[in-house]
Amino acid sequence: MKEQKIPYKIYLKEDQIPKAWYNVRADMKNKPAPLLNPGTHQPMKAEELEHVFCKDLVSQELDNDDSYIPIPQEIQDFYKMYRPSPLVRAYCLEEKLQTPAKIYYKFEGNNTSGSHKLNSAIAQAYYAKKQGLKGVTTETGAGQWGTALSMACAYLGLDCKVYMVKVSYEQKPFRREVMRTYGASVTPSPSMDTAVGRKILQEHPGTTGSLGCAISEAVEYATTHEGYRYVLGSVLNQVLLHQSVIGLETKTAMDEYGIVPDVIIGCAGGGSNLGGLISPFMGEKLRGEKDYQFIAVEPASCPSFTRGKFAYDFCDTGMVCPLAKMYTLGSNFIPSPNHAGGLRYHGMSPILSELYHEGLIKARTVEQTSVFEAAEQFARVEGILPAPESSHAIKVAIDEALKCKETGEEKTILFGLTGTGYFDMVAYEQFNDGKMGDSIPTDQDLQEGFSRIPQFPGNEF
Ligand SMILES: *Cc1c(COP(=O)(O)O)cnc(C)c1O
């Protein structure tokens, strides 16, 4: 073992939990492109967005200028139940790999919902409650977001209606039951409940569903029922804002011990954990104060950054949501049902898309079996059973550490360990039985998705 000057776990004190979220958009020269009205192709006005989203969240969504947005006291109090989260020095993994690299991970799985999503769920539920709403609707893929939102809604006494991607509803019955225990109603999507669900079922009978489709159903329910709004667990600017709590805590902990990361790695589904983790570091880079290397890791089965188009596209299959400019595989792209359910979204955060477009973030794809190999290796030495999504970041962190072994570089690697994998044992079972495969879409598969990206002047791709 290396000499241990830095503790295994750096825990901040309760009063070091951030009191304001950091808004990286304030430091971006080129702001993320605005959401467009799908009919007129004009930027969405606050009033239009307020039919779908809570008022205060709309103002956060549109705020490109304020660097810091205060975290209301009630949300700070909720954060105290499970934050600050530990920053862990992966001494055991370093030892196992025999690498000169120093590896750190920020662990967000220490709450019942099992992932970072609670950081934004409580914020969104809080603003819905403050507005006097009855409830919120949402979609969930793997189930982590639905679980997090159910917990937040139970805490605040809000009704919570979740459309759960059918394949996950069936593969992950325990997630569903956690949500119901917290009082949420859970419907497999596509469903016969909504017009858009019925239409999708008619066009694709037997579909296992997709996040894009579940979003359409949740939005339809919210906009056709008095006192409901729709909330989303990733992609949107407001979600990255809330998740900045991850990066702010990490930065405070690192600053206390004089640790400076060279490489920062995160898995990217819709981009919220990665965006949250890197925000304060990216801020320094954008202001020209420091330099870091940022790596987004995505599954080869859903390669939005690495093989997608940077264009305005629908956020949902039913084409009812505003258009967002992002790296996208097309709103009707339905990835093969791989096990990193939380990384199966066709698009990507507009903030991260802009940063990637400018070359400030790099991206890598990894295949499912190699991800589970990394997960297994990590679990055996570090103790934590990682979520399949998080394991994408583990895989690339290990790759980077092994590169350092070859070159002898003592790089400092930081990655986001977004959650635990206790509800993913069907996936682990397949891996342990040697039955896991890798499915990578062909160019032709992708072409089909691209062909549905809307075409209008100014949206060339
Ligand atoms: C949802 C989820 C992700 C991916 O979502 P992002 O918005 O890209 O962060 C990653 N890890 C876990 C554990 C998740 O639940």
Image: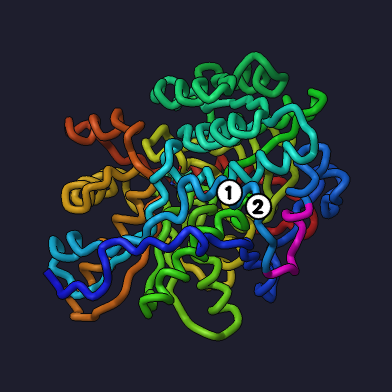
Left or right relative to 366: residue 314: right
- What's the amino acid at mark 2? Gln
Report the front residue among 306 and 281.
Answer: 281
Report the front residue among 167 and 200.
Answer: 167
* Residue drawn at (58%, 68%) of the image: 355
Q: What is the quadrant of residue 320 in the picture?
A: top right
| Count of labels in the image | 2
Q: Is residue 198 above or below residue 445?
A: above
Q: Residues in magenta?
A: 59-67
Residue 291 % position (x, y): 47, 81
Q: Residue 77 carries which label?
A: 1
Residue 179 % position (x, y): 51, 25
Left or right relative to 80: residue 417: left
Q: Name the residue under label 2.
A: 73
List the single residue furthest toward the bottom: 289
Image marks 2 and 1: residues in contact by CB distance under 8 Å: yes
Residue 338 % position (x, y): 38, 36
Secondary structure, mark 1, is: helix
* Residue drawn at (57%, 22%) of the image: 183
* Residue drawn at (83%, 50%) of the image: 44
Secondary structure, mark 2, is: helix
Inspect the magenta stretch and tell me whether residue 250 lies in it.
no
* Residue drawn at (54%, 70%) of the image: 280
